Image (tube, coloured by chain):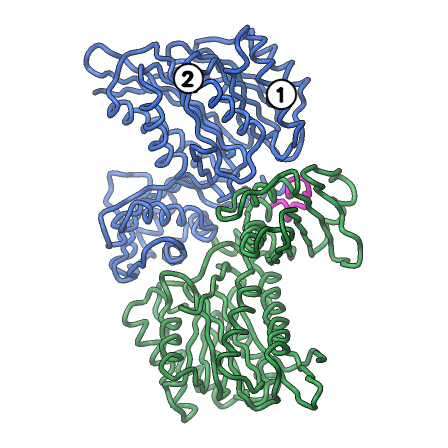
Chain colours: A blue, B green
Amino acid sequence: MKIETVRGGLCAVKGVRAYGTKEGHNGLALIEGKGQAVGMYTASKIKAAPVLFTKRQLEGSGGQIQAIIANSGCANSFTGEQGTRNAEKMAELAATSLGTNEEEIEVASTGPIGKQLDMELIERQLGDVVTELTAEAAGSTTAAKAILTTDTFYKERAIRIDTGDEERVVIGGIAKGSGMIYPHLATATATMLSFIYTDARLSEEILRASFEDDVANSFNMVVVDGDMSTNDLVLLVSTGQGGAISEGDFKEGLNLVCKELAKLIARDGEGATKFIEARVKGAASVADAKEAAKSIVRSPLVKSAIFGERPDYMCGRIIAAIGSCATVSDVDPGRISIGLKGEDKDKDKVSAVKNGEFMDLSGVARELMRDKEIFIEVDLGLGESEATAWGCDLSYDYVKINSG
Amino acid sequence: MKIETVRGGLCAVKGVRAYGTKEGHNGLALIEGKGQAVGMYTASKIKAAPVLFTKRQLEGSGGQIQAIIANSGCANSFTGEQGTRNAEKMAELAATSLGTNEEEIEVASTGPIGKQLDMELIERQLGDVVTELTAEAAGSTTAAKAILTTDTFYKERAIRIDTGDEERVVIGGIAKGSGMIYPHLATATATMLSFIYTDARLSEEILRASFEDDVANSFNMVVVDGDMSTNDLVLLVSTGQGGAISEGDFKEGLNLVCKELAKLIARDGEGATKFIEARVKGAASVADAKEAAKSIVRSPLVKSAIFGERPDYMCGRIIAAIGSCATVSDVDPGRISIGLKGEDKDKDKVSAVKNGEFMDLSGVARELMRDKEIFIEVDLGLGESEATAWGCDLSYDYVKINSG
């Protein structure tokens, strides 16, 4: 199997057209592509109207999908019956303008909580977008831009998998997310939005199994601020117009796309000046490794120390973060080691903590913290399991963005 | 029963002498008071040497205590065997200088994690402090100041309870805490430190039961940043030199002191410009109410919105915070109401959200957010249980303090 990056995002996938528009904070994206969809939804106890609507739609249609309509600028969350009606209305408008079945339209929203959608604006923007739908790369790019909120760049990724038998499979996706990022996506139900399409010919079962596993190790491992959104929604759609592929190969490709999109969200975290990757290995279980890795990138103190380029404070706070994990089996401080890397991944790790003892953190470790990417590897020295989480530092700009 | 505030802090309690000193970041406090102690310790999986030492000491002595020695400037956490020896050495030095039994000396530390104590400095500071030990108010105040780290003011409180039969009971305490505040104190095991003394004649059982219950509703309900410390330690000591008191009256008095000290920690949160009290009522259980209240004051987004005096963003993010509670029973968005108050508690609450609907948040609600104290009352509309948590906003200064 050979994997190569291709351009075009969503539109690199056979059978997908898209377009998006934005006016100030208000964006609208339309993605058209007939296929089989599986969805994962925020685990929040308060789910936004479009999340509940899309979940219901996919259950009703057995996962059959024609298009996705997504807006930014209003989350349509905590909006009562009016909110439900507006989500339905969005699907109805999209179905009418595409001349298709409204039962197979999915809806997503992102923006402030507690206010109603401006349906006139959405209807007008939809009119503009429908006429521009295209299978060219611009379709994916404009859609990716339309769903941004506090994001500073659009997030798009596509790969082509050469399975060897002249079969080609493309997986392409877009995502948005910058603040209120602590997704916990579950099959039963950010704002993180991501729409991933593939032309692979695969059954719904394989799509679902691959997706659940990949999301658990990609989107669910991103933390910007530890605030879970009522609107997180990720959809994977297969148009089935491309080649055949084994479950294993597809999973590997999907995993790559999901992780890249997840990392882009971490890189674009609100106010971020540095990207953080925290890998925890030597854990007694994968669940332990995941909790520990997420606790590190969630900690405001670890994040502030990284913003301030202080490896000494950072390491002490990593220790505290690991200690605070409620469900992690007992840890042994004397077995904990921490290695650090900056942007140059070919360099050897700097040993910051070795078997429970702090090393000299004034020289090369301090130097390394100036980089824009900080890789933290924690070895708990207890077992064979590992996990990786991604996040960003906590800067003045995070406070500025969220207080204004 | 009559309760009045008295001056003197710890030293208002019969049988207690104290003193403290500070040089730069390094402080040392000594509190002498023979009695019966009960302790609560951080739930962190990585407990600092003094926490483990003090727990062991109290188990060994059956709670009999002579004195507490506490330092700031170094947490003696993640310091291996050397750290354990240094904690023991602190107790030994204190016992020698007081001419007492080293098995009945407790030790506490706060400061950066991962570095060893400067034992020469501690020995020298102890020498200075021992000669100054006093039962005057200055003893408590200097001790309270000595244990501060990033705190901006010292925290001290004392009350006298008149039980009616010419019996008088005093409860006095000091506390410190400003950052890394998300205490989860458990009997089995910030840095938040608090030492509370009383001269009440009470059994260890009553002391313990009262303390566990009060800590659960006071110190454990304070959130500055959501980072749990390896060093949190709270001790309650009864010298037994005062009057008799019923369990109920004592609990009421102790509750008052614990809550006041907890609120002082929230008020002095790192970088805080506003104090936040979040009361959640109408919950299906107290556990639900507690989780929801803490999730509100923990949310970086809620905190940033309060710093920015934005009631609209704040309410949306409160909804998201409530939704994100993992263990809360299902909530019904349509039943949620949010009321707001500023500093003037006699004023009526401003209705910000009413049965799931956002009210106009541009006028009086916006006005109120300029106050230095913000009271949030959330009614989940589901049951009869309630809980209150305390915290502070997230300001540029939090980032500054923790990145420098």
- Secondary structure beneath dot 2 equals helix
Which chain is indicated by disc 1?
A
Q: Is residue A357 visible?
A: no
The image position of residue B67, as x and y in percent, is: 46, 84
Examine the image and state in which quarter residue A356 appears: bottom left
In percent of the image, x 60 and y 83: which residue is there? B138
**The residue stretch that appears in magenta:** B304-314
Q: How many marks?
A: 2
Compared with B182, A180 (above or below) is above
Instruction: Name the kind of residue labelled 1 in the image.
Output: Glu
Q: Which residue is mark 2?
A: A10
- What secondary structure characterizes most of the magenta part? helix
Would you say residue B15 sits in the magenta stretch?
no
| Label whose residue precedes the other's in the sequence (1 or 2) | 2
Q: CA distance from mark 1 to mark 2?
A: 22 Å
Compared with A296, B275 (above or below) is below
Compared with B36, B42 (above or below) is above
Which chain is indicated by disc 2?
A
The image position of residue B334, as x and y in percent, is: 65, 38
Q: Which residue is mark 1?
A: A23
Q: Quadrant of the N terminus of chain B?
A: bottom right
The foreground one among A361 and B36 is B36
